[in-house]
Amino acid sequence: MEWEAVIGLEVHTQLATKSKIFSGAATAYGAEPNRQACAIDLGLPGVLPVLNAEAVRMAVMLGLAIDATVARRSVFARKNYFYPDLPKGYQISQYELPVVARGHLDILVDGVAKRIGITRAHLEEDAGKSLHEDFQGLSGIDLNRAGTPLLEIVSEPDLRSAQEAVAYLKKLHQLVVWLGICDGNMQEGSFRCDANVSVRPKGQEQFGTRAEIKNVNSFRFVERAIEYEIERQIELIEGGGRVVQETRLYDPDRDETRSMRGKEEANDYRYFPDPDLLPLVIEDSFIEQLRASLPELPQAAFARFVRDYGLPDYDAATLTAERATAGYYEALVAATGGEARLCAKLCANWVMGDLAAALNRAGLPIGESPVPAEALAGLLGRVLDGTLSGKLAKEVFGAMWAGEGTADAIIAARGLVQLTDSSAIDTLIDDILAASPKQGEQYRAGQDKLFGFFVGQVMKASKGKANPQQVNERLLARLKG
Amino acid sequence: MHTQTLAELARGLAAGAFSSRELTEALLARIQAHDGALNSFITVTPERALAQADAADAARARGEFGVLTGLPIAHKDIFCTQGVKTSCGSKMLDRFVAPYDATVVAKLDAAGMVMLGKTNMDEFAMGSSNESSWYGPVRNPWDVRAVPGGSSGGSAAAVAARLLPAATGTDTGGSIRQPAALCGITGLKPTYGRVSRWGMIAYASSLDQGGPLARTAEDCALLLGAMAGFDARDSTSAGAPVPDYRAGLEAGLDGLRIGLPKEYFGAGLDAGVARAVEAAIDEYRRLGADVVEVSLPNAQLAIPAYYVIAPCEASSNLARYDGVRFGHRCEAPRDLVDLYTRSRAEGFGAEVQRRILVGTYALSAGYYDAYYLKAQQIRRLIHEDFRRAFEHCDLIAGPTTPDVAFDLGEKADDPVALYLADIYTVAVNLAGLPALSHPVGDKGGRPVGLQLIGPAFAEARLLNAAHRFQLATDWHRRAPQGFA
Amino acid sequence: MSMGPEQVAATAQLARLALRAEDVPAVAGKLSAILDLVEQMNAVDTAGIVPMAHPLELSQRLRADAVTESDRRADFQAIAPQTADGLYLVPRVLE
């Protein structure tokens, strides 16, 4: 039988606010245990929550970016359950009336475009962490993360393969980072994914029983966990078994998912509107103001890069993967000037090539590049006007990265200007030919490959500065002559 | 000094008749001498009080003082006080010392008031008799066999016994007005949102409201002015400016329309209480008020709706008491579930556990619509009843309670009978309205209270009416025998 | 409606309250009496009535995104039953 997987993703994005969603405690990652947990985060008696405006603004931004409906009135509810990392015994979340509903995201898998529905996105507070280190047989609870704002983004079960799931996840990751509402750091848990996976015979409309895979924290693991889970379910059903609805955990070391038995004892969350918080009302004027201030979205930037800069799809996609990269590239093109297409492609090659490599080696984001776009433009201008060869340009870039100054200053200091004076090049050629009579005879006798030898000698004599194209042309003329 | 009201004591301090230290020492001595019979305090704080009194005297000497500077107060033990135990009447919090002050505490501190201690209460404010306190029941100073009412029973008994002139309380379903009535004093439950709930331990968040208990409406006006106001730390705090509640106290009542809901005078109301209430209404007529009949057709649904909504909210509000970060923790828990279930079963008393169970059940899958949602629909009907009634009157008047104080233990094993003691008070909380109870008579030596209910934010009108009544009568001046 | 012993036990489990088996019948009796009281609500038809969750029919106020709290771990943990290395300790949380 042919099987089809049905996948829906729930993504928890930590919003990049300074303070928590309901308290004034800091959200910075990595503090010593419980030093960023205030009385509200700890759920001490008598404390009350007050909603962070920035978390609301970020949720609305996402809603606008995925073309969703932003609820004019949404309600915070309490999700009641006992767990040591949940200080109040309930999580403040949104249940019946989320702030964002009915949006979508377009993905591309193997050249095929597909629209993935987003059911809802709601605001809620994060829980703390249980540390399973052994304190005389006890667990330690760190509540620094408790109360960090989360936007839970729930997709429709529109995904049909692990590849689609990862494409969707990457697209969503790109978007939230692009919008500046999430730092996207998956190792630190800023962007976490639960996957609902089921299988059904191809052609069947009804969904199969689904399993939920919890907290998978890298794109690679999401793909592997889903693939494993699809296989497991198919094998189970084909072996005469039945999938049970349960929560499973992916173990990357053993590359398998396994049931989280016991933790799932009949949950009854007893949601009800949180009486400490009033309905969240979002005015049309606020939405319109945000819509006007929304940055160009990655999809639109990609299309524009292909259209306006004449870039290949691959280049446009790479350059619009992150907003900072796209911004750098555009600033670079604008500052470099020159013939448009030539300039656009040269700039793309540099941003994706030497600059990316150098940033990668140094472990720096593009926004902290020691060679800003305006400086790099100074270098590429000298390439476009023929002052520098590609090789020399790399040397100058290295010096700029090391902080030796502007491109022009380095060119002057090192005497790196390209030799383009024809008579000077002819002199060099004549000298080499005079010094290599034997090779000259052999070339004329038909050993064409010796041409490369002459080019190399001339370039060496010019210390690499001679314009290679001119050397080629003039050398050919001389040898024929 | 102990027989004087806050307003009178303020004049004494201003005139230099006595210092705040002298006043504080006298009242501390009185608490020491008399509270053994009442059990109205959980904690008395003499050192802190005397230090505050000295600071108040010094401030007065420097010319930096307000009307409340140096005057005594006690807080219901539901208000968090930094450095002083806040038990909420529960074993769960027997050793809980809050690392912060409630906004009400901070405001009255800032006004220069001297805190004498923390008063006894029903556990987590759940009760109408003060018998659910882990610290033992409070006794009614009018008759120590009788309950003082609850849940602010300690505050009401202490004020009635002249241990001090005023105390704070909280009112979720009548917990200020009912004990005020049973103890023969004046208590005001403000409009929901008028007084900040920050640091006030939650029972049912959409109903809880702090307010003053004192012997006179004038003193309630003085205190409310200092307690009320917007608080950025409480999302449900009202932004409306706080008027000067004393400014309008003296205004005449000519033309004031008082509505009598016929549903509050039917079966279930004790005849003696009815007589006292009717006499009080006559007094209001003499003072110039026009009395009209109004109807609150869904009044009988208030108790059922309240006993769904309050337990639902409570079951969630009290989930934080889990033995992990503060509060009672059982000995040697075997595992997590054992830690939770035993810490909570040991830390909470029977009535608290009952309400947690009722609320948990009512919110659970399959029952939510039939209980919680239904109760919230009835809440709207009740709210609408009041809105329509206030189209025909300025205030609503009626009995605060169906009967005078009952005996200790009388209803101890019958929660439903006890719940019915709140029959005239809970609707006000469901609708979020302000209401006041003031003494208007007695039956067999036990006081009767009259409840005045106003539209939202009409506290000044309530205080004005009660004050005029108190200028014309002396029920509020009568002291229980042995505590005069 | 009356609440049976099983429902009482299940509700107590959900509410994390240890109930002694011998107390269950008495608790069930009292809870059933309370449910009978609250079910007087059924006397009125509320079809179409919008539930009222809150007496203040206002909207949520927002606070500016600013860090206003400083580290008070020592104060907070002074009232905690059991801590070590700044962590609250509980019986092992099973994965």
Image: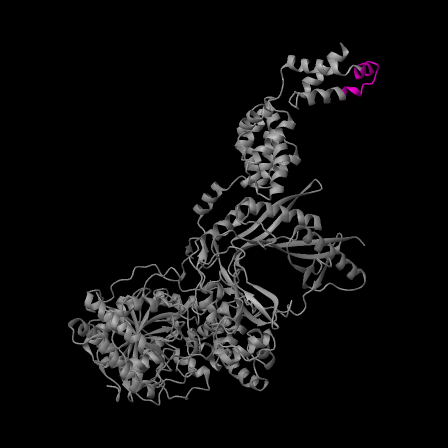
> Is residue B148 positioned above or below C70 on the image?
below
Which is nearer the eye, A85 or C12?
Answer: A85
Q: Position of residue B375 (x, y in %)?
A: 47, 70
Residue C67: quadrant of the picture = bottom left
Q: Is residue B445 magenta?
A: no
Q: Position of residue B205 (x, y in %)?
A: 43, 68
> Is residue B388 positioned above or below A151 on the image?
below
Q: Please, which residue is most extreme toward the front here?
A: A435
Q: In the displayed structure, does residue B95 sit left or right of residue A199?
A: left
> Is residue A330 positioned above or below C82 on the image?
above
Residue at screen point 44% across, 47% down: A286
Which is nearer the eye, B109 or B162?
Answer: B109
Q: Which residues are magenta?
A: A438-452
Q: Quadrant of the N terminus of chain B?
A: bottom left
In this rendering, does residue A222 appear at all? yes
Q: In the displayed structure, does residue A171 sit left or right of residue A162?
A: left
